[in-house]
Amino acid sequence: MSNVHVQPTLVEQVVNAIVSEIVEGELPSNSRLIQDELARAYGVSRQPVQQALLLLRDRGLVREAPGRGLIVSPIDPDFVRKLYEVRGMLDGLAARLAAERGGERARIEGPAFLEEGRAAVESGSLNAQINADIKFHGFVSELSGNSLIGETTAPHWPYLRRVMGEVLRDDVQMPQIILGEHAAILDAIIAGDADRAEALSREHTSRAAKIFVHRLQTQQAASDEIRQRRTRRIR
């Protein structure tokens, strides 16, 4: 049966456009989001922009700021840690079930997802790398035969995309590490080794979370130190 490709709605397209700008660093934390400006930039009316911003607010990427309207939310290390704890469990379950149920399909279709990841790394595009990553994990989730895994993760992908962008942007070695880990997970699924597939998948997610949370905590500590120095000077 051939896959049916559903065209994203206009609101989904605006959501993806805003998230892409956040991922690429064009809309950093605390950037003000003005509906009229976004509508002009994307060539749409204010309504899909408004709906997109409400969705992003519900997903934690956007928040209200007194006197400023909506802004890009600063990243919360504690929320990231909790989100990746949940994702690690779901990814591990997906990989285990994929190894038990989808080894043959993984052997036939899986290498194309790895190749797309390699091409994305060579392109240098953060969005291309993140999209390839999402497709790989979506494929593993599909192989699991449990649709609730993907449905549970889906609302959090915009925030996860942002975190992945932060991890990839500042570490030139990380893209190759991710590719290697994806290849190892796929090999375990093809071999039908459910224990190994689950373990590798959970380690893959845990490593990314630890790297990012540590980096963000270090950045925040440095920012706090700078603020304290400025305060001392003012006094």
Image (tube, rainbow, N blue to C red):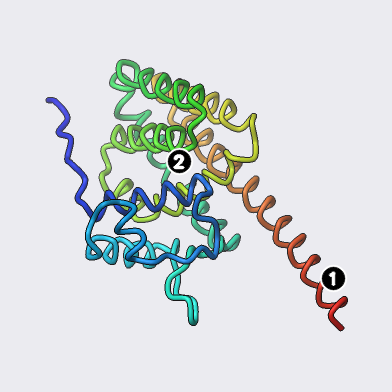
Q: Nearer the viewer, residue 49 or 164?
A: 49
* Mark 1 or 2: the one toward you: 1
Distance between the alpha carbons at the discs numbered 1 and 2: 45 Å
Residue drawn 39% across the image and 32% down it: 136
**As drawn, which residue projects farthest toward the bottom?**
235
Q: Nearer the viewer, residue 5 or 107?
A: 5
Residue drawn 68% across the image and 50% down it: 215
The earlier-in-sequence mark between 1 and 2 is 2
* Relative to 217, residue 182 above or below: above
Residue under pointer 2? 92
Q: Nearer the viewer, residue 232 or 80?
A: 232
Type of the residue with mark 2: Gly
Residue drawn 56% across the image and 30% down it: 175
> Residue 132 falls in which quadrant of the image?
top left
- Number of numbered discs: 2
Residue 70: image x %, image y %? 43, 71
Residue under pointer 1? 229
Label 1: how many residues lie within 10 Å, few (<14), some (14-19) or many (20+)? few
Q: Which quadrant: the N terminus?
A: top left
Asked whether the residues under the numbered discs 1 and 2 touch, taking CB atoms below 8 Å apart as contact, a structural biologist would say no
* Relative to 197, residue 16 above or below: below
Residue drawn 87% across the image and 83% down it: 235
Circle 2: element type: helix
Residue 86 is left or right of residue 7, and the answer is right
